[in-house]
Amino acid sequence: MKFLSRGLLVFIAFLMFFIPSVAQEEKTTIRVGISNQSFATYEHESVTFSSPEEILIVDLASNSQYKIGKDKTISVKIIDNNFKILSDGEILTKDAKGPVVLTPKEKIAIVELNRKGMPAYYSGLIELVAIKQNKFNIINVLDLQTYLKGVVPNEMPVSFGLEALKAQAVAARNYANRPQNAYKNYDVCDSTACQVYYGMNSQKEVSNKAVDETKGIYALYKDEPILALYSSTAGGISEDWKNVYALNQPNATPKPYLTSVCDDSNQNFLTTEKEVRDFYSNKTLSFDIKSPRYRWTVEWEIDELEAVLNKTLLEQSRAGLVEPKFDGSYKLEGLKDIKVLKRGNSGKALEIEIVFKNGTFKVMRELGIRRVLKKNNTMLASANFFVDKIEVKSENDKEQDKENQAIFSFEKFIHPYDNKVKKIVLTGGGFGHGVGMSQYGAGYMAQMGKKYDEILKHYYSGITLGTMQKEVLYNPYNIEYKTEFYYQKSSAKDVILKVVNPKRVSSLNFRINEHTFSPDMSGYSAKTLGMDITKYLVNGVNQIVFSPLSEKDKSKSITFQIEVGNKIGK
């Protein structure tokens, strides 16, 4: 074996710009916070479990252990911050400090929960952690692949096909590995606030295959996993991340892979009100065309919308998204107009003005706008819309129309004089925030024969696909450093092993499946080396294993990762 010669080196070192850093560690297990039946809270006072198998219960504070027979019911309550645990009504303990861990052989049910019309079963183990006076978290701890199998069919219809589901699996894997500090005791939640996770009973054969056949694969930008945002329907043009999540934040870290993308390469971004109106008035062909929310109309009687806005403007004022703040101390009356003041590349409303007889308010941000403009207590599908006012004429105006009918045609929409607004109508497109991958778009692309990497590269600009970086150090215990990934030989994609060697280690020892390599590193001056490993791969899961660095390189480190490239020969 040898690394590619300098002339054939696949990856050229960025010598002047390289800054050594510790690689982000890939999660092999994940901690999922489990909510109640309505997804309203993650703080529980009691819970009931059952399993067709034996369950081992351990109080980690005291190491007390209880083995429960199959088909038994286990009830847990927290009283005075101690866990009281009962099995079929028989008290096992009254004073477990916790965390309390329940370990089934294969699966355990949370009796109070029903997910997707079925009892909620979970694999892995369940951990109960006290969080405050008489409240605790329920945490499902399991391996990442099994977690994703409980996510993918709940985030995307399996009817969208294998390649779309693979794209969803990669995006969900990226999301699960994102850096986060939102939760203390778990990595992700189980609702739409994170990724929808319904456990074992929701798994489907085709979505399981999608997870298996993308094992270890991430969407990467400059070798780092991206924030792979996705939503149901972009509406034909996706939105720039900064417009939705970092508007008016000049110091926000850029995310160049989350820029606006048009499905139609001949389509321009929407920069005028006329362009917005023309685009969302028509079902222009795009990858989202099959979405039931591709185009939509919402209308309110004026009294209805005034009642909604009196409530929602107060709520969003408390969230800091309304200027000036509305405190609810008086009733807003005489709604006159809703104007879009600022738009994104997709025509998405980023700031609106709502005008009443007794007050004018600005609502900021896509989410704030959608939450303010509710219909039937449901927030607006997206902020991609234009506004029409339907007005009722006064008797004087009707007479004026009769006198001037030879000159003026009757106008249904905005009219002068003393007309009163009767209805507000929003016409728009899309469902969700519209940043990153459109799930309906992914489904359409898959039906067109596009592969999952093509889908991902359409929605995430400038990305590559591959594994996360793995750092290799010296250790005296001979602990190896391993990464696994799925490769499909029929894809004819070349695969590169990339080794970042900033301090130039003296030797390396690694395996690619059953092939062993020990290159002499003395002849390599580049800090980043690439090796085409395609011929050493098998169809299925492949394994790359690095031995720890030698004692001679005790103060050094390297990182390695694989990158799946273009078709061989291209």
Image: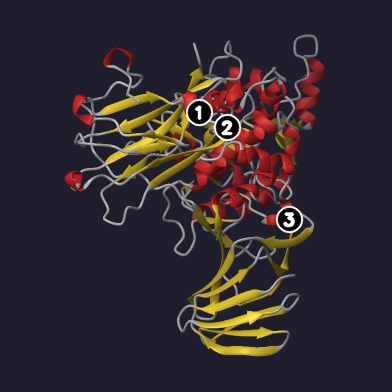
Q: Amino acid at mark 1?
A: Tyr
Q: Amino acid at mark 3?
A: Asn
As rendered, which of 529 and 304 lies closer to the eye?
529
Residue depicted at x 50% and y 55%: 29
- Picture coordinates of residue 162, whole percent (x, y): 69, 32
Q: Secondary structure at mark 3?
A: helix
* Pointer 2 residue: 437
CA separation, marks 1 and 2?
Answer: 7 Å
- The correct choice, above or below, for 542 with respect to 197 in the image is above
As rendered, which of 159 and 386 lies closer to the eye?
159
Q: Nearer the viewer, mark 1 or mark 3?
A: 3
CA separation, marks 1 and 3?
Answer: 31 Å
Q: Which mark is residue 460?
A: 1
Q: Is residue 224 left or right of residue 84?
A: left
- Picture coordinates of residue 9, whole percent (x, y): 32, 18
- Picture coordinates of residue 455, whole percent (x, y): 59, 26
* Pointer 3 residue: 201
Q: Residues within 10 Å of mark 1 (few under 14, many from 20)?
A: many
Q: Quadrant of residue 77?
A: bottom right
Q: Secondary structure at mark 1?
A: loop
